[in-house]
Every structure is written in C-alpha cells, then in structure tokens.
Image (cartoon, helix red, strand yellow):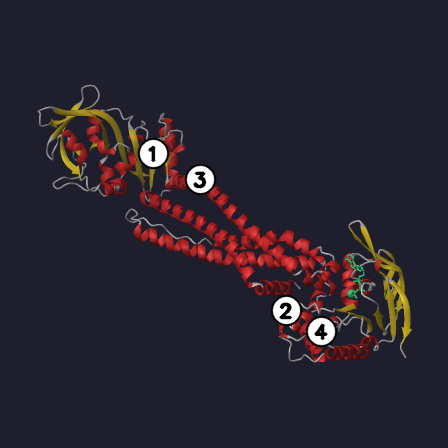
Amino acid sequence: MLREFFRLAGQNVLHRKLRSILAVLGVLIGIMAVVILISFGLSLKGLMTGEVAKVFGVDTFMVMDQDVMSGKHSGGMKEFGLNLETLKGVDGVKTVAAVRQRTAFVEGGTNGEGNVQQGFMPVMGLSPELLTDFAAFTGDLVFEEGGRQITGTDVDAAVLRRELADRLGAKLGDTILIAGEKSNEITATVIGILAASDEKQAEQGFASSMSSSSSDTIYVPYATMDLLWPEGNDFLVTVVRILPGYDVDDVADRAEVALKAEGSRVSAITSSDITSVIDQMMSYINIFLAGLAGISLLVGGVGVMNTMFTSVLERTKDIGVMKAVGAKNRHVLAIFLIESGLIGFLGGLIGTALGLGITAAACWGINTFAGLPAGASFPFVASPTLILATLFGAFALGAVSGLWPARRGARMPVVDALRYE
Amino acid sequence: MPLLDLKGIVKDYELGKTVVHAVRGLDLNIDRGEIVAIMGPSGSGKSTLMHLLGALDTPSAGTASLEGHNLHELSENELVTLRGKKVGFVFQTFNLIQSLTAQKNVELPMIFQGVRKSARAERARALLEKVGLGERMKHRPNELSGGERQRVAIARALANDPEILLADEPTGNLDSETGATILELLKKLSIDEGKTMILITHDPDAAAIAHRIVRLRDGRVVQEVRNA
Ligand SMILES: Nc1ncnc2c1ncn2[C@@H]1O[C@H](COP(=O)(O)OP(=O)(O)OP(=O)(O)O)[C@@H](O)[C@H]1O
Ligand SMILES: [Mg+2]
C-alpha cells in the first residue's frame, strides 16, 4: 500500500508542477548552501592536514614549549630549555635538529657619515641537521648571487635578509660583530644574503613562520650560538626524526617523559597532535556552519509547509473523495507526508548535486588560480556520509514541514471536505 | 432484517448560534436489492440523508444500522472500513481525482482496502469495460466528457463490490440524453449485480427506474410510493 501512496503522492507533485518546483527550489537552495559549506570545510581540512603531513611525514616530531601547544601561551613561539643530548639518547631517535633564538647586540659597517651601524637584533642558531635533513622546515631560500646557506662546518658565519644587510651596511663578505652573554663575542662573516625580491618564497619557509620579526633576524650556525650563549635555555623548537620501524607517537611520548624528568617544560608534538588541533578547530567552524545551515533549511521548510497548506486546501475535495471511498485518516496523512517528503527529497537531490558541483569547481579554481604554496592542494572531498545525510535530512525536512498541513487534511471531516467547493 | 434501518433519525447542524435542523425524525428501511428513489425540494435533507445512509456521517439522534451494525457503536476507523467495503458513492459532480487516470480513479477504493496491484488493475479494466470505457483507461478526467466522467465514477463506486450504491443526483450535471443512458446503466448494473441502490434525484424520469419513491420535506418523509 505504501508503494501506491508514493505513486499517488508523486502524481500530486507532478500535477502541480510550478508550485512543486518553487517548493523544491526553496529546499534546494538551503541544501545546496549546507553542502557547499560543509564540503568547503572538508576541503580546508584536507589542505591543512596535507600541509602538516608534508612537513612532518610519519617519522618526524617536534619538541616545543608545553604552553605553546596547550594554547596557554598566545603569540607564536616561546623559548624553552632542554638538554639536546637527552633527546638524542631517547630510544628510536635518529636525528635531532634545533633552533635557538636570542637577542644580541650587533655591530655592522659604517654608513656614509662614518657612523657605525649597530643595534639589538634577534639571532637564530640553526643546527646543520636542520638544513640538511629537514628541508621542508626551512623551505627553499633564495640567496643573492655569491651567497650560500650555512653548512655544518661553518662557525663564524651569518646569513641576513636584504633589508637587514642594508640597515647594517653589510655586504657579502663583510664581517659583523655579534655580542653574546658575558663577554662572549664573535666576528662573523656574511656568507649569504637572502634575496628581498623573493620574500614570498622565503615566507613559506621555517624562518618566517617561526618568528614574527624575521626580517631582522640574523641566522648563525648552531655552534656559534653555543659559543655566544653556552646555556641552552633558548630553544624555539627542536625537530626530531626517528629511526625506521619505530612509531612516531611512541618515540615522542618517550622523549617528552625523558625531557620532563629533567625539568624541561616541553611537549613533543606529532602530526596526529596537530591534526587533532585542526579537528578541534574544524568542529567550531562546523558548529557555526550548522547554524547557518539550520537557518537556510528553516526557510526551505517554511516554503514546503506553505506549499503543503495550499496543496491540502486545494485538494480538500479529493480528501473527501478518498475518505468516502475508504481512506482512513492515517492513509490521507501518509499520502500528504510522502508528498512533502518527496518535495524535500527532490530539493535535496538537486541541491546536493549542485552543491558538490559548485564546490568541485571552486576547488579547481583555487588550485588553478589562487597561487597556493608549491605542492599544496585544496582537495575536493565528496563525503558519502554527507551525501547520504543530506538526502535523508532533506526527505525528513520535507516530511516534518508537511506534518502540520497533512494533519489538518487528514482530520478534515469527510462530509465537510465533500461539500468544499 | 432490512439492509439499512433508520429509526428516529435527527441531524442538526450548528452554525454559530443558529441550529439548522436538516433531518427531523426520520424512519426508513431499505431491503437488499431494492432500488429506492429519494425526492424532495432543495434543502429538504436529501444529501444529508445520503451521508447518513452511507456512513459518512453520524446522526445527532436516533439509530442507523447497516447490515445489523449499529453505526453509533463503531469507531471512526471501523466506519471507514465498513463504508469502503459496503458502500459505493456516485456524486452529482463526479468527484474524480484530477491528477489520476480513469484506471487509477477506479483502483482508488481498492488501494485503501489493500487489494494487490495485479488484481486491482484487472478489476479496474473489467469495470471500465463494463461501463463502456475500455478504450479510455489511461485518460485523465479533464480529457473525458461529463457522461464519461460519470461512467468512471460509477465504475469506481463498484470497485470493492459493495452491497449498496448511493447516487446523489447522478444526472444533475448531464444533459437529458446522457442522463438517460447513465440511468439505464445504473439500473442495469444494480439488477445484474444484485445491488441495492438509493438514488437521490429531482428528475421524475430518474425516479421511474426505482421500485419505491420516498419524498422528503423539511427533513421528514412525507410520502412513500411503490412503483408498479
Ligand atoms: N454542513 C452543514 N452545515 C450547516 N448546514 C448544513 C450543512 N449541510 C446541510 N446543511 C443544511 O441542511 C439542510 C439540508 O441540506 P441538504 O444538502 O441535505 O439538502 P438537499 O435536499 O440535498 O438539497 P439540494 O437538493 O439542494 O441538494 C439545508 O438547509 C442545508 O443548508
Ligand atoms: Mg443535495
């Protein structure tokens, strides 16, 4: 009997085409908005997790100050202390690279009037391993002609940005004086200047993402850092690669325990930690999206309700006839509920298809024209769960919106319905 | 035992503060196989009576029983089921469902009784052939003439093989010639199929096919005549 009710309801939808189309349109727009918003969120998440995976891989974790990841410390990085040898000794650790940062008094060349250019600048010490083993962290830095990156054997060397080189009046091959704690100081040769024109590319690298005042930063070898400030309590981050066959989360846990046992206030972060932060963030975005979606669906639902009231009114006589030939109240109710459910479902079907189509096109557009970082992609995600949920939800939306009108129709006394003109 | 038995039937309609007494104390028995014509001026309560006879409505007072079932004692759903199985209606305005084909309109009463699809389709075809519309099964009401629509309505009324056919001015919207053929058809069917038929009409020609003519005025029976 149910199948026949579907057929009867379908006939009704088809019989009043224009009105059905308008009601379908109302649902369609709402569902389309929902699908676009959610798919876009999924794409965004895909982009972020893709980037995280590229930097971390399955064999890398980071050690940071424990407040940075827990969110207690806002505003980027925070220096912390740890014993690098302890980290290197943890079972499963293959390579450790560290970044340290201090503020130092720096003296450059003289300007036109013969004044020495000097000031306090951040100095960042990079482990040679960082440059050799963790290229994804540093990015592809572009040097001005004749310049080069710091290597493991450098000691009294520095790399500057173009802006800073200008301010210090230093050219490639010049020396600058860097003063550390107590009376430690070194005279470092400028071995490389990062091209200013290629700032965008440098932005993607580790240097810019790690420090907000990176255009001021002087990069020096890790060994130089040790000479200037022997006490290692100024780590910004350490990056750890593990040996094959180990699980990155296990090794990270062991490292964290070992470091904390020595009093270091650090936490070890793997890609799954970051992914869960992203998930958390996405869940807030999703709550917001659900609110928007709810509003548009409400509008669609009111449209269906309006259509169904009209439909019930218009078919009052039909209701009378159906009841006269043996339809019970629940039969009439079912027919109208199915009718409004079908309107919802149709809106859901078309809305989902359009929504996915628009999202796919937008993803393609972003990937093609938006100039994402090299290798990054904004993936189009067609989630089967989303599709099934919206289709079912659209049918339910239609049915629920039709409930009130359908009940009114079903409860109409048969004699009154038959007399209706 | 009469098929239909009405005793002391009263039907009032309340319209705000005024009460309309549509039927004021009416007794009527109808036997199986009878053709009864109900006549009377407009507003005399004929349609109201038909609704009561067909279990579409319940009286304000008095008892109405169909095949011994006291309609007062039945729940709404039981009334619907009884009506669906025992009574077929033919209306003055045909009352076909516009969005459905002739065949589907005839199938409708069977759908609500849960008759299987194949059985339903076969019976609808047979009935439409019987009323001379075998070629028009797939037509919708707006593609049919008035007389053809009323034939579809008659086929629909017969769908569940009811005991009783109730026709409220079935020729009221038809020209006299078409009306005459519809009356012929109704008479033939009720005799062939052994149906009890109650025919409400203004038309003396229509009344002529009945075994008995009941005249109403102001909600009361004022005259009963047996046709020869
Ligand atoms: N639902 C209703 N509400 C109020 N009054 C009603 C209702 N149905 C019928 N009446 C009144 O009851 C009286 C009898 O009406 P009914 O329709 O039975 O007359 P009828 O004999 O069928 O007339 P006609 O020949 O014009 O069809 C009329 O006065 C009518 O106004
Ligand atoms: Mg009438």
Q: At label 4, which amino acid type do we have?
A: Gln
Query: Are discs 2 and 4 less than 8 Å apart at CB?
Result: no
Q: Looking at the image, is A240 positioned above or below residue B146?
A: above
Residue drawn at the location 56% of the way across and 53% of the way down? A303
Query: Are discs 4 and 1 less than 8 Å apart at CB?
Result: no
Closest to the observer: B32 or B113? B32
Structural distance between the alpha carbons of marks 4 and 1:
87 Å
Structural distance between the alpha carbons of marks 1 and 3:
21 Å
Where residue A256 sits: x, y (%)?
Answer: 37, 32
**Do marks 3 and 2 share a chain?**
no
Q: Quadrant of ligand 2?
A: bottom right
Where residue A339 sits: x, y (%)?
Answer: 60, 59
Residue drawn at the location 16% of the way across and 37% of the way down? A193
Q: Quadrant of the N terminus of chain B?
A: bottom right
Tell me: A52 left or right of A281.
Answer: left
Estimate how packed mark 2 is, as few (under 14), some (14 to 19) or many (20 or more) residues with alpha carbons within 10 Å.
many
Structural distance between the alpha carbons of marks 4 and 3:
68 Å
- Residue receiving disc 3: A280
From the image, state whether disc 4 or disc 1 is nearer to you.
4
Q: Looking at the image, is A359 positioned above or below residue A79?
A: below
Query: Are discs 3 and 2 less than 8 Å apart at CB?
Result: no
